[in-house]
Amino acid sequence: MHEPRPSNMHIAMVSVFPETLAVVRDVGVMGRAVRDGRLKLSAVNPRDFTVDRHRSVDDRPYGGGPGMVMRPEPLAAAIEEGKRLAGEGARVVYLTPQGRRFDDRRARELAREPGLVLLAGRYEGVDERLLDSQVDEELSIGDYVLSGGELAAMVVIDALARFLPGVLGHEDSAEEDSFADGLLDCPHYTRPEVYADRSVPQVLLSGDHAAIARWRRKQALGRTLERRPDLLERRENERVLTADDKGLLEEYRRERLEVSRRAIEDGVANREEATRTEGRSRDDGASEVLE
Ligand SMILES: C[S@@+](CC[C@H](N)C(=O)[O-])C[C@H]1O[C@@H](n2cnc3c(N)ncnc32)[C@H](O)[C@@H]1O
């Protein structure tokens, strides 16, 4: 088996807190990718490009109001340095809650870029003219506001680096994760066989690889239907839901209905049993009193 081609991707994060990059650079899968040279990560501090005594990167907003705004000149110089490190063709991305929502698809696309410069803002954000003149794209990691763009930048780095050749031990494993083919991942189990009164689904112990693959596909489809029906709808609209998938979904629905029906029956039976027992103990109590 041939080794996947090592990636030369270089990502530079522009941030006033360069030390935060350690979170992705030093540990886990990303740490190994960096050590193996499949991914290069650098941090560039805009403070290193200031000329005043206080090394200030922010200033008061024109028009007044609370908070500070990041000044364009030190950021522009830091981005320039980021491009020098990441390669001249590097795409410049600003992390902002106002950007396009980052997702699996964008992570895969960005993994094909030769290099990236990720700009992490602080305070109230960045002077708009810097964004207009220096930034190629704005990305958001969700509808909430963080105090800085560093965590968002690291989310992007981690998510896209998983698609770089050779970064994940088993090349296929990213393809079995959630969103890989527009579905959520199936449930996973490991030892022990029984935990908290719950057994591992029998089929996973069967050794029948075809049956296991079929079960996993059915669970992935069913979970997506229950938790993210929007994803299934998109597959339906894109006409990529196969007849087999539709059959498995139908089977999943039937099985869930059966489980609910049995749970209701058990509930009714338990309630009847409880009423009978209660009645008996009331009778016992009554006879005790009578004695
Ligand atoms: C306090 S926020 C500024 C928010 C800005 N005033 C707004 O309301 O759009 C400071 C920095 O955090 C980063 N940030 C905050 N939330 C983010 C999100 N959801 N996605 C990506 N970056 C985010 C951005 O880099 C931003 O410049």
Image (spheres, rainbow, N blue to C red):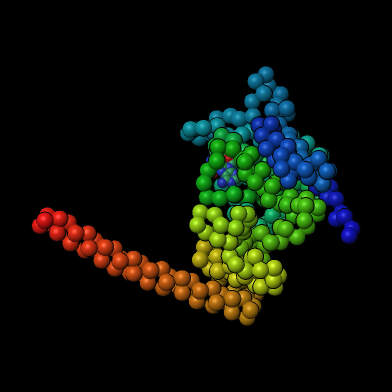
Tell me the quarter of the image containing the N terminus: bottom right
Residue 275, x across and y down, in percent: 25, 65
Instruction: Name the outermost residue toward the right.
Output: 2
Residue 135 visible, this angle: no
Pick whichever, 74 or 215, lies toward us.
215
Pick whichever, 272 or 175, lies toward us.
272
Q: Residue at x 75, y 41 (%)?
A: 31
Q: Residue at x 56, y 34 (%)?
A: 123
Q: Residue at x 63, y 50 (%)?
A: 139
**Left or right for 260, reference 69:** left
The mark total stands at 0
* Residue 124 drawn above or below residue 225: above
Determine the image quadrant of residue 127: top right
Residue 118, x across and y down, in percent: 70, 43
Residue 170 visible, this angle: yes
Determine the image quadrant of residue 84: top right
Residue 252, x across and y down, in percent: 54, 73
Pick whichever, 120 or 198, lies toward us.
198
Residue 109, x across and y down, in percent: 72, 57
Q: Quadrant of ligand 1?
A: top right
Instruction: Name the outermost residue toward the left.
Output: 290
Q: Residue at x 59, y 76 (%)?
A: 248
